[in-house]
């Protein structure tokens, strides 16, 4: 947010900061909010590319339940801020 404020000369303090994106932008939005949760009060991912995996589905040890990158990132860090809710 400091970059946005410096580039756009915005110095207003907003009560809430929302981040909503779709498709691959939704994947990006989720990653940004997960890494900077204190900045945002709400977010939405619509039709996000949450299917991205760290293994190809044709690999022998592929497991759909553990290969989705963002699902794994959320599940491995249960100490997110309490206002962040995830529904898969």
Image: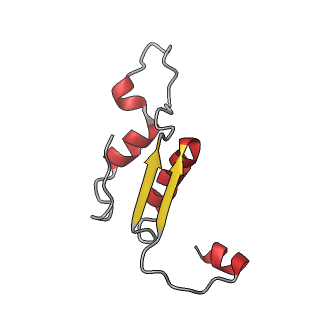
Q: Is residue 13 above or below residue 21?
A: below
Q: Is residue 64 left or right of residue 79?
A: right
Number of numbered discs visible in the structure rendering = 0
Image coords of residue 56 (percent x, y): 52, 21
Residue at screen point 58% across, 73% down: 1
Q: Is residue 74 above or below residue 79?
A: above
The one nearer the camera, 77 or 26, is 26
Q: Is residue 83 left or right of residue 2?
A: left
Residue at screen point 33% across, 52% down: 77
Seen as rendered, the residue at the extreme right is: 7
- Dividing the picture into quadrants, the one containing residue 7 is bottom right
Q: Is residue 84 above or below residue 86?
A: below
Image coords of residue 9 (percent x, y): 69, 83
Image coords of residue 81 (percent x, y): 32, 65
The one nearer the camera, 50 or 36, is 50
Q: How is the image coloured?
A: secondary structure
Image coords of residue 86 (percent x, y): 32, 49
Q: Is residue 66 left or right of residue 30?
A: left
Residue at screen point 28% across, 53% down: 78
Report the quarter where the C terminus lies.
top left
Residue at screen point 52% across, 47% down: 26
Q: Is residue 59 above or below residue 31?
A: above
């Amino acid at each position: 947010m400091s970059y946005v404020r410096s580039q756009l000369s915005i110095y207003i303090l907003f009560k809430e900061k929302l981040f909503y994106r779709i498709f691959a932008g939704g994947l990006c939005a989720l990653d940004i909010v997960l890494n900077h949760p204190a900045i945002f009060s709400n977010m939405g991912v619509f039709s996000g590319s949450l299917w991205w995996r760290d293994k190809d589905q044709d690999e022998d040890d592929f497991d759909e339940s553990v290969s989705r990158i963002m699902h794994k990132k959320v599940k491995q860090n249960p100490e997110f801020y309490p206002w962040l809710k995830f529904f898969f």
